[in-house]
Amino acid sequence: MIARDNVFQLDKMPLFAVLKSDELNFLKKAARTLRYKRNAEIYQTGQRALKVFYVLKGAVKIAAQNDKKEVVKYVVQAGNLFGESCLMGDRYRRDCAYAMMNDTEILELEVNALLYLMRHNFSFAQSLLHLLGERLRQTEMHLENVVLKDSRSRILEFLHQMGVEHGRQVGVEILVKHNLTHQDIADLTGTSRQMVTAILNQLKRSNLVYFNRKKILFRDLDALSLYAN
């Protein structure tokens, strides 16, 4: 972990754009920017929850773990919060967080400063609640998928969502750069690593995707959606 002296321009970020200049200055005093290497721990289960984190660059894996196994709960991309449960009263971490790539940059914010601003700036409180609501909606959708859909459908839907939300147009194809292992995708979809590998190989043979450890190239996202159905 490397601490940086400068704090990013908070007023350039959508979440903090509603803050007044004095509020921004107050928040900057309660913030710092940190840079992490791949797989570096940001926080661990049982640790005091005194900070909220905002991903500036890279991605962060949130996982639950015990002595025998670690299960990925979700992945946080740039422009999103994590560790926010302390805003709702959690005193200790229920999960752990790791950087997923080198030079992952995290804005670390003191929870008491955020709570103060939420009490004094209704627009900021609304912005935070919107982000928390989106996280809850995604969690509910994930639970519904696990209960109502079979393994194949969950994996295909997850891949399609990756392409839509994180893909970059390359000619007529969509490129997604990522750091997810097949086991990570299995954890995120409630399936097995063997099933993920089998589905990806089927898609590759059907010329719908090309993939390696660092990227997935979607030949045709619409065709993938039809394949899922």
Image (cartoon, helix red, strand yellow):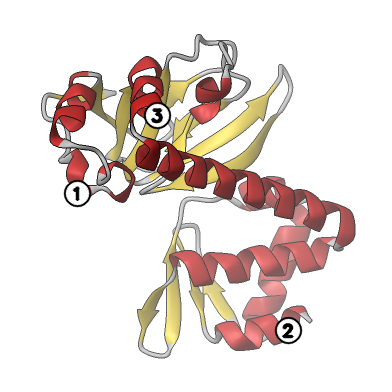
Residue that mark 3 sits on: 118
Mark in the foreground, 2 or 1: 1
- Between residue 129 and residue 163, name the one nearer to us: 129
Q: Percent position (x, y) of residue 75?
A: 53, 45
Q: Is residue 153 above or below residue 124?
A: below
Which label was assigned to residue 227? 2
Residue that mark 1 sits on: 12
Q: Percent position (x, y) of residue 44?
A: 53, 18
Q: Percent position (x, y) of residue 94?
A: 63, 20
Circle nearer the N terminus (1, 3): 1
| Residue 2 in view (yes/no) | yes
Mark in the foreground, 3 or 2: 3
Dividing the picture into quadrants, the one containing residue 178 is bottom left
- Between residue 32 and residue 115, name the one nearer to us: 115
Q: Is residue 213 above or below residue 112?
A: below
Q: Is residue 29 above or below residue 189?
A: above
Q: Secondary structure at mark 1?
A: helix
In space, the residues marked 1 and 3 are separated at their CA atoms by: 19 Å
Q: Secondary structure at mark 2?
A: helix
The quarter of the image holding the N terminus is top left
Along the horizontal axis of the image, is 223 left or right of 53?
right
Q: Residue at x 88, y 59 (%)?
A: 148
In space, the residues marked 3 and 2 are separated at their CA atoms by: 45 Å
The quarter of the image holding the C terminus is bottom right
Q: Secondary structure at mark 3?
A: helix
* Amino acid on which disc 3 is placed: Met
User: Circles 2 and 1: CB distance less than 8 Å?
Assistant: no
Circle nearer the N terminus (3, 2): 3
Residues packed near mark 3 inside 10 Å, few (<14), some (14 to 19) or many (20 plus): some
Q: Residue at x 66, y 28 (%)?
A: 64
